[in-house]
């Protein structure tokens, strides 16, 4: 019993030190000196602990001497603990939206297993986020309209470190009423990510099609212009979402990919003016008899540069008996940022097989020939400049974009193209950011089309968008 | 006067817009220095600038030698992001564009892969904004 007694305070000390050492992250100090001092004190404690262990083993520790040494050590350990608490407090009190350049440093000293137990619930349970945009649109022909275009809330949750839930619920045009022409509520995303390996992760649920730039990056402060690009409206039907699943990963050296199987588009609702847009099934009792593969490969290995290509193909005539309607879509896009300048561009084209038969079948069903094209094509190029230096807290961006989009690019035999849908636009505008997540936008659209009869009116738009 | 796409010289515009970035492309910075701190004067310090933007970190893979002190300078090109390393309990906010940077020093004591991710919801693709530090 006498031999055990000296080990009790030793064990207490070890526990206390263990508590200190278990905090594997030394939180930030405003100065390097404080961190260095802490490390040196910790090293002194470790040495003292070793000395004590040697003495206990050699049974040379008298109870009195041992008590004296052991009471001195926890005091220092408590001081270190206190210092760390203060530092952690500094960390907490530092505003999340820190304006302090080159804020404090963090040193991680040891690796821990990625387990649920090792992670605090505050980190695992992802809070909500959202974005909204409201627009004032004027085109000189139709009445000027004020439209609260999008009210979107995003929610997430972490089931441990390996399974994540993410969702996006959208209310468009502010008002929804049954059997009336009004807005819509859409569940654009609701999926689980199973994080297996950086190169191979599985995703399933309601997902966004990884096609082009805007479909997956549509937060208002993240693109120029009040409305989304015409190419991402008429050629790529954003927001394009549906049920499905697949794999997502980072291949290294700047390459990343997405490969999904998703529900397809419905050719019976394609149109001459809006192309595939009407064919979105939007998650409502979707026809899943023919799942459509879609994939995207991105290169982002150089700072500021992002190049991507996407491909989709699917059977679309499932609501038209006896017709095969294989559709394809191909996209190339790129973004580059250098200093105060940004460039982005995108090219997208589609092809629909048996377009003539689909047109005839839809006409038999509805009495109206939709005049769907065999292929559509669109592209845009945009250049933008930040007019304020990067260090400014406010930002002002001027941009110019040229768009060319034709939803009647190639017609099936026996069908003539409607020239008013061979369109282009010169868009100039400005975006003011009083805060990085708040954008006040204005743009003017010079619209053109290839028709000699039907004109597309010019328009201006004003919008406010924000993200939180 | 009606629009004819073939007559507008859009190929020239495309060339001008995309050739300029190509000439400016290589600005990667991964300087290596020595640690100025007295207690670790002899340790190698590897400095890396990581840029966060919706929805990726660039670079997303960082390789270091075992025993290196990795100094990561994090900046954002758009909104506020987070930098979280679950395995070592780091979670920091990356200030938005124009609002400074945050520095994280990772002590690569042990070989292995250490994943990091954005911990502040930043948009539709937030959940896959991830990267990895490989200690060799």
Image (spheres, rainbow, N blue to C red):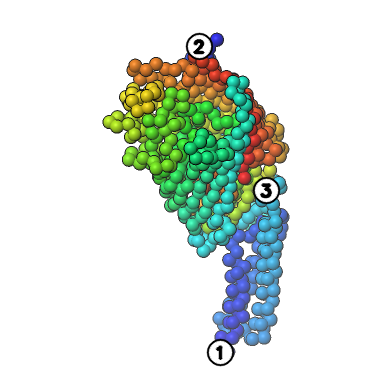
Q: Nearer the viewer, residue B96 or B104?
A: B96
Q: Nearer the viewer, mark 3 or mark 1?
A: 3
Find disc 1 in the rendering and name its residue. A1
Q: Nearer the viewer, residue A309 or B18?
A: A309
Question: x, y percentage for residue A117?
Answer: 51, 63
Kindly identify which chain the residue marked by label 3 belongs to: A
Find disc 3 in the rendering and name its residue. A97
Q: Earlier in the sequence, mark 2 or mark 3?
A: 3
Q: Earlier in the sequence, mark 2 or mark 1?
A: 1
Question: x, y percentage for residue A163?
Answer: 47, 54
Q: Nearer the viewer, mark 2 or mark 3?
A: 2
Q: Residue at x 47, y 47 (%)?
A: A190
The residues tagged by marks 3 and 1 sit, at their Cα atoms, a distance apart of 58 Å
Q: Mark 3: which secondary structure?
A: loop
Q: Earlier in the sequence, mark 3 or mark 1?
A: 1
Kindly identify which chain the residue marked by label 2 belongs to: A
The residues tagged by marks 2 and 3 sit, at their Cα atoms, a distance apart of 54 Å
Quarter occupied by residue A11: bottom right
Find disc 2 in the rendering and name its residue. A452
Q: Nearer the viewer, residue A345 or A451?
A: A451
Any part of residue B34 in sight: no
Q: Residue at x 44, y 52 (%)?
A: A194
Q: Mark 2: which secondary structure?
A: loop
Decide if residue A358 is on the left or right side of residue B31.
Answer: left
Kindly identify which chain the residue marked by label 1 belongs to: A
Q: Nearer the viewer, mark 2 or mark 1?
A: 2
Q: Share a chain, discs 2 and 1?
A: yes
Decide if residue A411 is on the left or right side of residue A42.
Answer: left
Say few, some or many: other residues with alpha carbon within 10 Å of mark 2 (under 14 / 14 to 19 / 20 or more): few
């Amino acid at each position: 019993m006498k031999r055990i007694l000296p080990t009790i305070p030793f064990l207490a000390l070890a526990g206390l030190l263990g508590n200190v050492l278990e905090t594997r992250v030394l939180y930030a100090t405003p100065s390097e000196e404080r961190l260095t001092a802490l490390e040196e004190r910790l090293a002194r404690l470790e040495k003292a602990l070793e000395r004590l262990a040697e003495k206990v083993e050699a049974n040379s520790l008298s109870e009195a001497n041992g008590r004296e040494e052991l009471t001195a050590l926890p005091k220092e350990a408590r001081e270190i603990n206190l210092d760390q608490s203060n530092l952690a407090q500094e960390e907490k009190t530092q505003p999340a939206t820190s304006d302090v350049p080159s804020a404090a440093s963090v040193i991680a000293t040891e690796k821990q297993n990625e387990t649920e137990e090792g992670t605090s619930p505050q980190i695992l349970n992802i809070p909500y986020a959202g974005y909204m945009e409201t627009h004032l649109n004027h085109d000189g022909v139709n009445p000027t309209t004020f439209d609260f275009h999008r009210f979107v809330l995003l929610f997430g949750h972490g089931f441990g470190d390996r399974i994540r839930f993410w969702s996006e619920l959208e209310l468009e045009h502010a008002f929804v009423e049954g059997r009336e022409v009004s807005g819509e509520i859409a569940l654009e995303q609701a999926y689980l990510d199973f994080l297996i390996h950086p190169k191979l992760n599985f995703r399933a649920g309601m997902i966004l099609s990884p096609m082009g730039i805007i479909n997956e990056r549509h937060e208002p402060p993240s693109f120029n212009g009040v409305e989304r690009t015409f190419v991402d409206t008429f050629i790529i039907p954003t927001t394009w979402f549906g049920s499905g699943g697949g794999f997502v990963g980072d291949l290294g050296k700047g390459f990343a990919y997405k490969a999904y199987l998703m529900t397809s588009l419905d050719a019976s609702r394609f149109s001459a003016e809006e192309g595939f847009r009407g064919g979105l099934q939007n998650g409502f009792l979707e026809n899943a008899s023919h799942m459509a593969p879609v994939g995207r490969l991105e290169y982002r290995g150089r700072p500021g540069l992002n190049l991507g290509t996407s491909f989709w193909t699917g059977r679309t005539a499932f609501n038209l008996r006896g017709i095969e309607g294989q559709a394809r879509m191909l996209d190339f896009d790129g973004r580059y940022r250098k200093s105060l300048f940004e460039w982005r561009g995108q090219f997208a084209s589609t092809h629909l097989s048996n377009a003539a038969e689909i047109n005839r079948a839809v006409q038999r069903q509805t009495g109206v020939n939709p005049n769907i094209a065999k292929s559509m094509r669109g592209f845009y190029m945009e250049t933008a400049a930040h007019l304020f230096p990067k260090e400014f807290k406010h930002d002002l961006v001027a941009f110019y974009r040229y768009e060319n989009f034709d939803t009647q690019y190639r017609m099936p035999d026996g069908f003539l193209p409607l020239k008013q849908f061979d369109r282009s636009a010169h868009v100039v505008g400005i975006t003011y950011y009083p805060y990085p997540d708040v954008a006040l936008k204005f743009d003017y659209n010079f619209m053109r089309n290839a028709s000699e009869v039907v004109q597309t009116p010019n328009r201006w738009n004003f919008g406010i968008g924000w993200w939180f | 006067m009606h629009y004819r796409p073939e007559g507008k010289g859009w190929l020239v515009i495309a060339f001008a817009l995309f050739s300029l970035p190509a000439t400016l492309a290589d600005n990667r910075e991964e300087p290596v220095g020595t640690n100025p701190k007295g207690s670790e004067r002899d340790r190698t310090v590897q400095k890396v600038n990581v840029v966060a933007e919706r929805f990726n970190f660039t670079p997303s893979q960082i390789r270091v030698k075992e025993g290196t002190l990795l100094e990561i300078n994090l900046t954002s090109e758009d909104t506020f992001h987070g930098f979280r390393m679950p395995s070592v309990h780091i979670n920091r906010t990356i200030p938005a564009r124009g609002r400074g940077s945050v520095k994280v020093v990772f002590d690569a004591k042990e070989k292995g892969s250490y994943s990091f991710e954005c911990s502040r919801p930043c948009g539709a693709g937030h959940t896959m904004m991830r990267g990895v530090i490989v200690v060799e």
